[in-house]
Image (tube, rainbow, N blue to C red):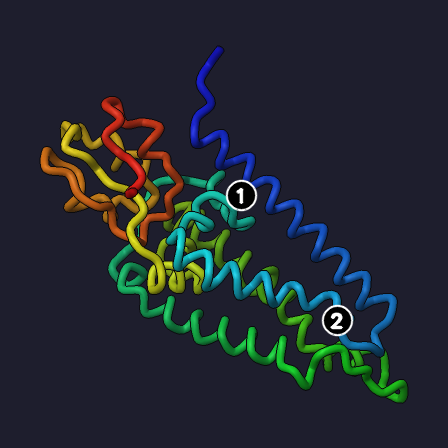
Amino acid sequence: MSKITFGEIRRRNQRTSFFLFLILFILMLLSLIQNPWYKAPLEWYFISVLGVIGAFILPAKFGRHYCGQYCPTSFIADGINPVNKAGSILKSRHLRKVFVALFAAIFIITFSPWNMALPASMTQTYWASVFTKFWILWIICPFIIAFPLILILAFWKGGRTWCNYICPWGAIGVALGSPQLLVTAKCTSCKACTKVCPQPEVLVGAIGHQGGQIDKNCLTCLKCVDVCPVQAIEWIK
């Protein structure tokens, strides 16, 4: 029986989260179409709770593990050219700061207390009622802003370019999280890990006979663990 790799587990996790996200998107969209004169019902606000947990609490504990293993966008990005061709502008991460600010603004506006489940006026037109629902931004932005950029950057600069250098949730994970992986002294400097890593610069300073912690911007996709011939990469205890 062949051994199950971390790559297979990762793809399963990504596929599951992608389809769950897609189902949620369809349900919210149908809710809007069927009854445009009302704000999102209170039960939809579990999304904001999940957003806080996913964006702040989990990264503080597990770093960017969500990015590498569960993010629904990574289901698409991982299937595109894995070679990292990002230049100095993207690696400077100035764009990431812009998207962090955009993410924060959308989150605050979307889930502001005065917007929670308040009915729109029945005298409004259908589309006027639709556009007064700020929570729709939470649906529109991933599909209108994020996905097109993910695809463009993936084909242009490599599959995980968005995740590595722009994604605001990734930036929060880097800011709050800590390094998750360690290269031990068993490392032989064969650099097999750098050939499969979607962001090989996180390995600089860690690979070698002395070993060391992998930079906390690592996605923890665990491709490096799968290919290491001497099993020199471990979780930090």
Residue at (46, 50) in percent of width and height: 66
> Counting other residues with Cα less than 10 Å from the Cα at mark 1, is it few (<14), some (14-19), or many (20 or more)?
many
Residue at the limit of the structure toward the front, as seen here: 237
Residue at the limit of the structure toward the top, as seen here: 1
Q: Are marks 2 and 1 in contact (CB under 8 Å)?
A: no
Label 1 element class: helix
Residue at (21, 37) in percent of width and height: 183
Q: Nearer the viewer, residue 32 or 44?
A: 44
Which label belongs to residue 171? none
x, y (%) of residue 9?
A: 50, 32
Residue at (40, 64) in percent of width and height: 172
x, y (%) of residue 79?
A: 49, 38
x, y (%) of residue 158?
A: 38, 46
Identity, as a three-letter code, of the amino acid under mark 2: Leu
Residue at (49, 74) in percent of width and height: 104
Label 2 element class: helix
> Counting other residues with Cα less than 10 Å from the Cα at mark 2, is it few (<14), some (14-19), or many (20 or more)?
few
Identity, as a three-letter code, of the amino acid under mark 1: Phe
Work out whether 186 lies above or below 48: above
Work out whether 226 lies above or below 180: above
Q: Earlier in the sequence, mark 2 or mark 1?
A: 2
Residue denoted by label 1: 75
Residue denoted by label 2: 42
Mark 2 and mark 1: Cα distance apart in space:
30 Å
Q: Hey, which quadrant is residue 174 in on the image?
A: bottom left
Question: Along the horizontal axis of the image, is 207 left or right of 116?
Answer: left
x, y (%) of residue 1?
A: 49, 10
Q: Nearer the viewer, residue 32 or 52?
A: 52
Closer to the eye: label 2 or 1: 2
Question: Along the horizontal axis of the image, is 20 left or right of 188?
Answer: right
Q: Hey, which quadrant is residue 237 in on the image?
A: top left
